[in-house]
Image (cartoon, rainbow, N blue to C red):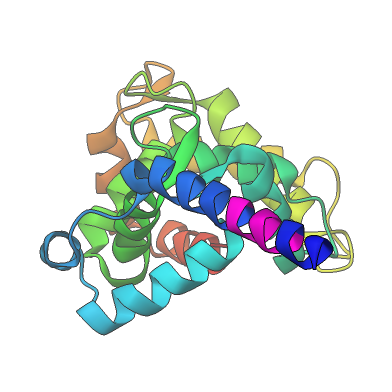
Amino acid sequence: QLAVKSNISLQQKQHLVEDELELSAVRHRPEGLEQLEAQTRFSRKELQILYRGFKNECPSGVVNEETFKDIYSQFFPQGDASTYAHFLFNAFDTDHNGSVSFEDFVMGLSILLRGTVQEKLNWAFNLYDINKDGYITKEEMLDIMKAIYDMMGKCTYPVLKEETPRQHVEVFFQKMDKNKDGVVTIDEFIDCCQNDENIMRSMHLFENVL
Protein backbone atom coordinates (compact mmCIF):
# COMPACT_ATOMS: atom_id res chain seq x y z
CA GLN A 1 0.00 0.00 0.00
CA LEU A 2 2.84 2.33 0.86
CA ALA A 3 4.46 1.48 -2.44
CA VAL A 4 1.23 2.30 -4.25
CA LYS A 5 0.92 5.59 -2.36
CA SER A 6 4.48 6.62 -3.09
CA ASN A 7 3.94 5.61 -6.70
CA ILE A 8 0.89 7.86 -6.94
CA SER A 9 2.69 10.80 -5.38
CA LEU A 10 5.56 10.21 -7.79
CA GLN A 11 3.13 10.31 -10.72
CA GLN A 12 1.56 13.47 -9.32
CA LYS A 13 5.00 15.03 -9.05
CA GLN A 14 5.74 14.07 -12.64
CA HIS A 15 2.51 15.66 -13.80
CA LEU A 16 3.32 18.77 -11.81
CA VAL A 17 6.74 18.94 -13.41
CA GLU A 18 5.19 18.45 -16.86
CA ASP A 19 2.67 21.20 -16.13
CA GLU A 20 5.47 23.47 -15.01
CA LEU A 21 7.37 22.77 -18.23
CA GLU A 22 4.23 23.38 -20.25
CA LEU A 23 3.68 26.66 -18.45
CA SER A 24 7.24 27.78 -18.94
CA ALA A 25 6.81 27.02 -22.64
CA VAL A 26 3.64 29.08 -22.87
CA ARG A 27 5.58 32.03 -24.23
CA HIS A 28 6.62 29.75 -27.10
CA ARG A 29 3.02 28.87 -27.90
CA PRO A 30 1.77 30.27 -31.17
CA GLU A 31 0.10 33.64 -31.09
CA GLY A 32 -3.64 33.34 -31.55
CA LEU A 33 -4.49 31.22 -34.55
CA GLU A 34 -6.54 34.11 -35.92
CA GLN A 35 -3.44 36.28 -36.00
CA LEU A 36 -1.37 33.62 -37.76
CA GLU A 37 -4.22 32.99 -40.14
CA ALA A 38 -4.21 36.68 -41.03
CA GLN A 39 -0.40 36.82 -41.39
CA THR A 40 0.04 33.66 -43.47
CA ARG A 41 -1.64 31.94 -46.39
CA PHE A 42 -2.66 28.92 -44.31
CA SER A 43 -6.17 28.10 -43.18
CA ARG A 44 -6.97 27.56 -39.51
CA LYS A 45 -7.19 23.79 -40.07
CA GLU A 46 -3.78 23.72 -41.81
CA LEU A 47 -2.23 25.74 -38.99
CA GLN A 48 -3.59 23.28 -36.43
CA ILE A 49 -2.13 20.33 -38.37
CA LEU A 50 1.23 22.12 -38.75
CA TYR A 51 1.29 22.96 -35.05
CA ARG A 52 0.57 19.36 -34.08
CA GLY A 53 3.48 18.19 -36.23
CA PHE A 54 5.73 20.94 -34.91
CA LYS A 55 4.94 20.10 -31.28
CA ASN A 56 5.50 16.45 -32.01
CA GLU A 57 9.05 17.10 -33.24
CA CYS A 58 9.71 19.94 -30.79
CA PRO A 59 7.70 19.53 -27.57
CA SER A 60 9.19 22.73 -26.10
CA GLY A 61 7.60 24.75 -28.90
CA VAL A 62 10.90 26.01 -30.28
CA VAL A 63 13.60 24.42 -32.42
CA ASN A 64 17.28 24.99 -31.86
CA GLU A 65 19.82 24.58 -34.62
CA GLU A 66 20.91 21.05 -33.70
CA THR A 67 17.33 19.73 -33.74
CA PHE A 68 16.73 21.52 -37.02
CA LYS A 69 19.80 19.83 -38.53
CA ASP A 70 18.70 16.41 -37.23
CA ILE A 71 15.22 16.79 -38.73
CA TYR A 72 16.61 18.08 -42.01
CA SER A 73 19.23 15.36 -42.41
CA GLN A 74 16.46 12.74 -42.42
CA PHE A 75 15.22 14.16 -45.73
CA PHE A 76 18.65 13.97 -47.36
CA PRO A 77 20.25 10.75 -46.10
CA GLN A 78 22.35 10.48 -49.27
CA GLY A 79 24.28 13.70 -48.60
CA ASP A 80 25.49 15.98 -45.83
CA ALA A 81 22.73 18.48 -45.11
CA SER A 82 24.24 20.10 -42.01
CA THR A 83 25.73 23.20 -43.67
CA TYR A 84 22.64 23.95 -45.72
CA ALA A 85 20.44 23.34 -42.66
CA HIS A 86 22.59 25.88 -40.78
CA PHE A 87 21.98 28.56 -43.43
CA LEU A 88 18.30 27.66 -43.67
CA PHE A 89 17.92 27.82 -39.89
CA ASN A 90 19.36 31.35 -39.90
CA ALA A 91 16.88 32.37 -42.60
CA PHE A 92 13.94 31.02 -40.57
CA ASP A 93 15.28 32.55 -37.34
CA THR A 94 14.15 36.05 -38.28
CA ASP A 95 14.84 37.68 -34.91
CA HIS A 96 18.27 35.95 -34.69
CA ASN A 97 17.79 34.64 -31.16
CA GLY A 98 19.15 31.16 -31.89
CA SER A 99 15.80 29.41 -32.02
CA VAL A 100 12.93 29.01 -34.46
CA SER A 101 9.45 29.33 -32.98
CA PHE A 102 6.29 27.99 -34.56
CA GLU A 103 5.51 31.52 -35.77
CA ASP A 104 8.93 31.85 -37.43
CA PHE A 105 8.49 28.46 -39.05
CA VAL A 106 4.98 29.07 -40.38
CA MET A 107 5.74 32.57 -41.68
CA GLY A 108 8.71 31.21 -43.67
CA LEU A 109 6.80 28.19 -44.89
CA SER A 110 3.88 30.34 -46.03
CA ILE A 111 6.20 32.41 -48.24
CA LEU A 112 8.02 29.39 -49.64
CA LEU A 113 4.91 27.39 -50.44
CA ARG A 114 2.36 30.05 -51.27
CA GLY A 115 4.15 33.37 -51.55
CA THR A 116 4.34 35.54 -54.65
CA VAL A 117 7.46 35.35 -56.82
CA GLN A 118 8.58 38.65 -55.27
CA GLU A 119 8.16 37.30 -51.71
CA LYS A 120 10.00 34.09 -52.55
CA LEU A 121 12.88 36.02 -54.09
CA ASN A 122 13.08 38.30 -51.06
CA TRP A 123 13.28 35.20 -48.88
CA ALA A 124 15.92 33.62 -51.12
CA PHE A 125 17.98 36.83 -51.02
CA ASN A 126 17.87 36.74 -47.24
CA LEU A 127 19.09 33.13 -47.31
CA TYR A 128 22.03 33.96 -49.60
CA ASP A 129 22.91 37.08 -47.61
CA ILE A 130 24.61 35.03 -44.92
CA ASN A 131 25.87 37.89 -42.75
CA LYS A 132 22.62 39.86 -43.24
CA ASP A 133 24.35 43.09 -44.34
CA GLY A 134 21.95 43.65 -47.25
CA TYR A 135 24.36 42.43 -49.96
CA ILE A 136 25.31 39.06 -51.43
CA THR A 137 28.99 38.51 -52.10
CA LYS A 138 30.41 35.89 -54.43
CA GLU A 139 31.73 33.98 -51.40
CA GLU A 140 28.29 33.90 -49.79
CA MET A 141 26.71 32.60 -52.97
CA LEU A 142 29.42 29.97 -53.26
CA ASP A 143 28.92 28.85 -49.64
CA ILE A 144 25.21 28.29 -50.26
CA MET A 145 25.79 26.53 -53.60
CA LYS A 146 28.40 24.20 -52.07
CA ALA A 147 26.03 23.44 -49.20
CA ILE A 148 23.26 22.49 -51.66
CA TYR A 149 25.62 20.22 -53.63
CA ASP A 150 26.86 18.57 -50.42
CA MET A 151 23.31 17.96 -49.33
CA MET A 152 22.19 16.48 -52.64
CA GLY A 153 24.97 13.94 -52.28
CA LYS A 154 27.39 12.52 -54.79
CA CYS A 155 24.93 9.85 -55.93
CA THR A 156 22.39 12.41 -57.11
CA TYR A 157 24.86 14.15 -59.37
CA PRO A 158 27.43 11.46 -60.29
CA VAL A 159 28.93 13.64 -63.04
CA LEU A 160 29.50 16.70 -60.86
CA LYS A 161 33.04 17.84 -60.43
CA GLU A 162 34.44 19.71 -57.46
CA GLU A 163 34.57 23.00 -59.37
CA THR A 164 30.95 22.87 -60.58
CA PRO A 165 29.47 25.05 -57.79
CA ARG A 166 32.15 27.69 -58.43
CA GLN A 167 31.44 27.68 -62.18
CA HIS A 168 27.72 28.16 -61.51
CA VAL A 169 28.40 31.00 -59.14
CA GLU A 170 30.71 32.73 -61.64
CA VAL A 171 27.95 32.69 -64.25
CA PHE A 172 25.19 33.74 -61.85
CA PHE A 173 27.23 36.45 -60.23
CA GLN A 174 28.31 38.00 -63.50
CA LYS A 175 24.68 38.24 -64.58
CA MET A 176 23.46 39.60 -61.27
CA ASP A 177 26.14 42.13 -60.42
CA LYS A 178 24.96 44.68 -62.99
CA ASN A 179 27.14 47.58 -61.87
CA LYS A 180 30.20 45.32 -61.30
CA ASP A 181 30.85 46.56 -57.75
CA GLY A 182 31.51 43.04 -56.42
CA VAL A 183 28.24 42.69 -54.49
CA VAL A 184 24.65 41.95 -55.44
CA THR A 185 21.87 44.12 -54.01
CA ILE A 186 18.31 42.91 -53.51
CA ASP A 187 17.16 44.92 -56.54
CA GLU A 188 19.85 43.40 -58.77
CA PHE A 189 19.01 39.95 -57.44
CA ILE A 190 15.25 40.23 -58.02
CA ASP A 191 15.64 41.94 -61.38
CA CYS A 192 18.04 39.29 -62.66
CA CYS A 193 16.03 36.33 -61.35
CA GLN A 194 12.81 37.60 -62.88
CA ASN A 195 14.43 38.21 -66.26
CA ASP A 196 16.49 35.04 -66.55
CA GLU A 197 14.72 31.72 -67.02
CA ASN A 198 17.76 29.64 -66.12
CA ILE A 199 18.24 31.38 -62.80
CA MET A 200 14.52 31.16 -62.12
CA ARG A 201 14.69 27.41 -62.76
CA SER A 202 17.59 27.15 -60.32
CA MET A 203 15.45 28.97 -57.80
CA HIS A 204 12.86 26.23 -58.24
CA LEU A 205 15.55 23.61 -57.74
CA PHE A 206 16.34 25.51 -54.58
CA GLU A 207 12.67 25.39 -53.58
CA ASN A 208 12.73 21.61 -53.95
CA VAL A 209 15.37 21.32 -51.25
CA LEU A 210 13.21 23.06 -48.69
Q: Is 210 located above or below residue 22 in the figure?
A: below
Q: Nearer the viewer, residue 196 or 186?
A: 186
Q: Is residue 151 visible?
A: yes
The image quarter containing residue 28 is top left
* Nearer the observer, 136 or 67: 67
What is the count of numbered marks? 0
- Left or right side of 141 for 194: left
Query: Which residue is depicted at the point 32% across and 80% down?
Result: 46
Q: Name the residue at 39% across, 65% down.
A: 197
Residue 80, placed above or below residue 44? above
> To which quarter of the image does residue 144 belong?
top right
Q: Position of residue 11 (x, y in %)?
A: 66, 60
174 sits left or right of 152 in the view: left
Nearest the viewer among 118 and 56 is: 56
Where is 139 relative to 89, above or below? Answer: above
Q: What residue appears at the point 88 percent right and 59 percent down from the top-left corner?
A: 154
Q: Main secondary structure of the magenta part?
A: helix
**Residue 43 shows up from this direction:** no
| Magenta region | 7-13
- Residue 51 inside the magenta-drawn segment: no
Q: Quadrant of the N terminus?
A: bottom right
Q: Does residue 40 appear left or right of residue 53 in this picture? A: left
Residue 19 coordinates in the image, percent (x, y): 47, 52
